[in-house]
Image: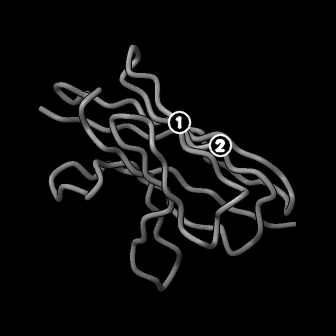
Amino acid sequence: QVQLVESGGGLVQPGGSLRLTCAASIRLFSLAAMGWYRRAPGKERELVAGINSGGTTNYADSVKGRFTISRDNAKNTVYLQMNSLVPEDTAVYYCNTSPGIANYWGQGTQVTVSS
């Protein structure tokens, strides 16, 4: 059974940083393209950052230059380093494959950027 567990969220001031972690129990994880998504209040879930099996990354325009996605295949883990956070980054953050598989969505981790 696939399980994706996100952690690392919290309350941070504008300009601050957080590092999110996703522990993934996915068979052949190293071959899977993975992504970090977020759902802000009143908005649909969107892809924030993706990383394929070869390590190539892609980012939403709104986070380019501020967020960095990475993976550790030995640990079946995906990370999202978030710097220079702004209030508009406030959302529940999820990880999933890219594109996302409906049955894989976990609980997510809340990120709140506020002074």
Compared with 29, 56 (above or below) is below
**Residue at horizontal 80 percent and vertical 67 percent from the top:** 114
Query: Which residue is identified by label 1?
Result: 70
**Residue at horizontal 76 percent and vertical 60 percent from the top:** 85
Circle 2 Cα neighbour tier, 10 Å, few/some/many (<14 / 14–19 / ≥20): some
Q: Quadrant of residue 14?
A: bottom right
Compared with 74, 18 (above or below) is below
Circle 1 Cα neighbour tier, 10 Å, few/some/many (<14 / 14–19 / ≥20): many
Compared with 31, 93 (above or below) is below
Q: Residue 77 at what x, y percent from top left?
A: 42, 28
Query: Which residue is identified by label 2?
Result: 81
Residue 4: give its label: none
In this picture, residue 6 sits left or right of residue 20: left
**Residue at horizontal 77 percent and vertical 47 percent from the top:** 17
- Three-letter amino acid code of the residue under disc 1: Ser
Q: Residue furthest left?
A: 1
